[in-house]
């Protein structure tokens, strides 16, 4: 774990293939976004939110769970400040992801980093980190993954709002696409005992936290706690050697 | 709601979403991080993935209670085995979808 991570501000040598690589890496995300995005659009239209507003929300916010909660809160007659506050709390978890991905984006221009930050989601983060780890990735491919996923999200949510009625959303197991993707990415992350330990701790802590404490604090709480416990176990073991 | 009300709401939501994504990048990408922080951050992806998956696999998301033996969990086992065998993300996604669809088809 204590190996040096190279700073990858250089592009990969076979630069021609960047778009193809990004498409290959991001299609599971886009595929998973279609049923979720359609569902969000349908719910929004049933809540009386027009399709142009759904498109505007997907462009400006680009955060799936917060958008679902926004639609539910608007539908329940909530004021706008509680919605803004809830959005902030739900999306705080991206603070951790942006910190972790920053290790691979050292020294890049602030304009690039700002555009990149816009596209950090649970899904693009997980895919990009896996590829950065393998070493066959660069910032151009990473931001292409972000923006392809962003496009799929905007298109599918807007389409859902325009269709605006019940459609067979879960057809052919598409509602399992993102879960299956997370499972595979989780497996690819396991590079030693400390990672396995951290994963098991996170599963246990997050389940307990989710059941016991309302809201979405379990994501940040359990991630920080499990990573810290894993980190200290590794430290303790290294010191005893 | 009017156009301007929607614009205000979504801009504000966008801003509070963007800031936590942006600040660590701008701050951390331009300095040398201490090794302990790099080591700790290297454990964050696995921790976040497991935290996101935990309620999907182990909890009833309507009642927010522990539930073992959900279809999501049962399908996760062959999906993981498939991922170990193939090491292929795209194929695993398709296999997981097919298994989930098959499971619901057989048991509902």
Image (tube, coloured by chain):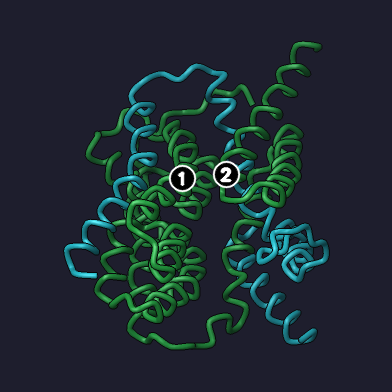
Rendered image quadrant of residue B61: bottom right
- Chain A image colour: green
Where is the N terminus of chain A found, in terms of image quarters? Answer: top right
Confirm or deny contact between disc 1 and disc 2 (CB under 8 A): yes
Residue of label 2? A217
Along the viewing direction, whichever of A216 and A14 lies nearer the viewer: A216
Q: Is residue B90 above or below residue A82?
A: below
Disc 2 element = helix
Extreme residue toward the left, this view? B4
Q: Residue at x 51, y 44 (%)?
A: A129
- Percent x, y of residue A209: 69, 45
Q: Chain of mark 2?
A: A
Q: Residue at x 34, y 73 (%)?
A: A155
- Percent x, y of residue B106: 79, 86
Residue of label 1? A89
Along the viewing direction, whichever of A114 and A206 lies nearer the viewer: A206
Q: Could you tell whether A131 is left or right of A156 in the image?
A: right
Where is the C terminus of chain A found, in terms of image quarters? Answer: top right
Disc 1 element = helix
- Percent x, y of residue A59: 28, 61
């Amino acid at each position: 774990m204590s190996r040096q991570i190279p700073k990858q501000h250089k592009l990969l040598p076979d630069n021609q293939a960047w778009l193809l690589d990004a498409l290959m890496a991001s299609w599971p995300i886009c595929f998973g976004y279609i049923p979720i995005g359609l569902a969000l659009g349908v719910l929004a239209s049933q809540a009386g939110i027009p399709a142009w507003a759904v498109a505007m929300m997907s462009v400006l916010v680009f955060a799936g769970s917060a958008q679902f909660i926004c639609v539910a809160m608007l539908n329940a007659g909530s004021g706008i400040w509680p919605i803004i506050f809830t959005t902030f709390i739900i999306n705080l978890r991206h603070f951790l992801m942006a910190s972790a991905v920053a290790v691979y984006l050292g020294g890049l221009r602030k304009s690039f980093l700002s555009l990149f930050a816009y596209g950090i989601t649970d899904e693009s983060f997980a895919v990009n980190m896996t590829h950065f780890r393998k070493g066959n990735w660069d910032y151009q491919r990473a931001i292409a993954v972000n923006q392809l996923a962003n496009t799929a999200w905007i298109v599918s949510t807007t389409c859902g709002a325009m269709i605006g009625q019940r459609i067979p959303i879960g057809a052919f197991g598409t509602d399992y696409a993102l879960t299956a993707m997370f499972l595979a990415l989780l497996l690819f992350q396991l590079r030693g005992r400390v990672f396995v330990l951290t994963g098991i701790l996170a599963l246990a802590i997050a389940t307990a936290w989710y059941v016991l404490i309302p809201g979405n604090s379990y994501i940040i709480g359990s991630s920080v706690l499990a990573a810290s416990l894993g980190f200290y176990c590794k430290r303790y073991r290294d010191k005893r050697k | 709601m009017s156009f301007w009300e929607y614009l205000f709401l979504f801009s504000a939501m966008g801003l509070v979403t963007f800031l936590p994504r942006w600040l660590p990048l701008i701050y951390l990408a331009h300095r040398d991080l201490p090794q302990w922080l790099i080591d700790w951050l290297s454990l964050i992806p696995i921790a976040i993935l497991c935290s996101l998956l935990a309620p999907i696999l182990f909890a009833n998301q309507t009642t927010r209670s522990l539930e073992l033996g959900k279809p999501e969990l049962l399908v996760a086992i062959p999906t993981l085995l498939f991922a170990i065998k193939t090491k292929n993300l795209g194929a695993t996604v398709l296999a997981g979808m097919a298994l989930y669809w098959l499971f619901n088809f057989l048991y509902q």
